Amino acid sequence: MPQQLEALRERHDVERQFHDEKAASAHNSDQRNFYSAGGVDSIWRAYWAALGDIQGKSVLDFGCGEGWSTLAYARNGAAVYSFDISSESVRNLIHDATRAGVASCIHPAVMAAEALGYPDEAFDLVLGVSILHHVDLDCVGAEIARVLKPGGRALFIEPLSHNWLLQLFRWLTPARRTPTEQPMSVEQIQQFGKHFGEARFQGHALLSTFSQGLLWATGSKWIFLKSLLVTEAIDQWLLRFLPFLQRYCWSAIIEVRK
């Protein structure tokens, strides 16, 4: 593991600098605004349905960023441990948790995902949003398997790489992401799942990706939400009857169990 971490040092430096600058320059980030506006609603309905009741559960918010997810888990009664490689992001989380009155329910830390400073079998749930595509999947898969309790689950929302239109958009907007991150392929999801036996994934946001484009282009939440009603309804039908299209979605919910 020490040799692997040394090899990842440059990657960690790039990720740390990017997210420190992002957190310091704009506390209300694009990602925060997107998800708080409703984001891709189908993802969050499915995500929270998969989570179920987390009251009293020990949760690790894996790569928490500025911590809006940490606050959501804490408000739902979980004991939340969270970490991020960005110290500025964690500082913002602590500030927001104090204002929200849930600071006593969270345990934030600054660390890299490939070397977790937690004991074995510590968590009922490991949860993350847009984090796996930033990290070394082999190292991280082993670490997640280590810190999960027997029978524990990990759930992630991650971008997928198979839609060429989305890949074109990503290529045209490099400032929105780090040069070291890469959306995940189905093959990478399967490789990650080998640490747990298997990984299941469910694609979300096929045509509704265009609603997200309208939000970015117009800045209008009203236009975004109206278009989302139509595109999500079409997506629901397409993904139900043509499941092979799931790999071409914008994002997927990935689930593994120890």
Image: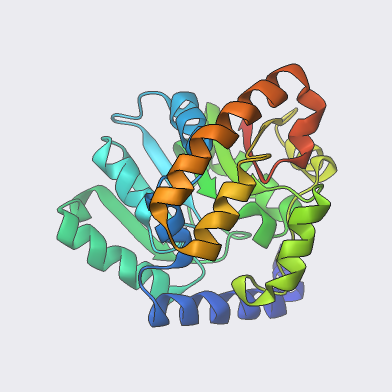
The answer to whether any part of residue 191 appears in the image is yes
The vertical placement of 230 against 131, above or below, is above
Residue at the (77%, 74%) spot, across then down? 7
Determine which quarter of the picture holds residue 235: top right
Instruction: For the N terminus, give its image quadrant.
Output: bottom right
Residue 159: x and y in percent read: 67, 50
Residue 231: x and y in percent read: 59, 36
Instruction: Judge left or right: residue 211 versus residue 139.
Output: left
Residue at the (20%, 51%) spot, across then down? 102
Residue at the (51%, 74%) spot, across then down? 19
Residue at the top extreme, as displayed? 241
Q: Nearer the viewer, residue 64 or 114?
A: 64
Residue at the (62%, 80%) spot, across then down? 13
Q: Nearer the viewer, residue 124 or 236?
A: 236
Instruction: For the C terminus, give its image quadrant.
Output: top right
The vertical placement of 28 against 183, above or below, is below
Instruction: Judge left or right: residue 29 versus residue 179.
Output: left
The vertical placement of 237 against 165, above or below, is above
Residue 173: x and y in percent read: 68, 72
The answer to whether any part of residue 126 appears in the image is no
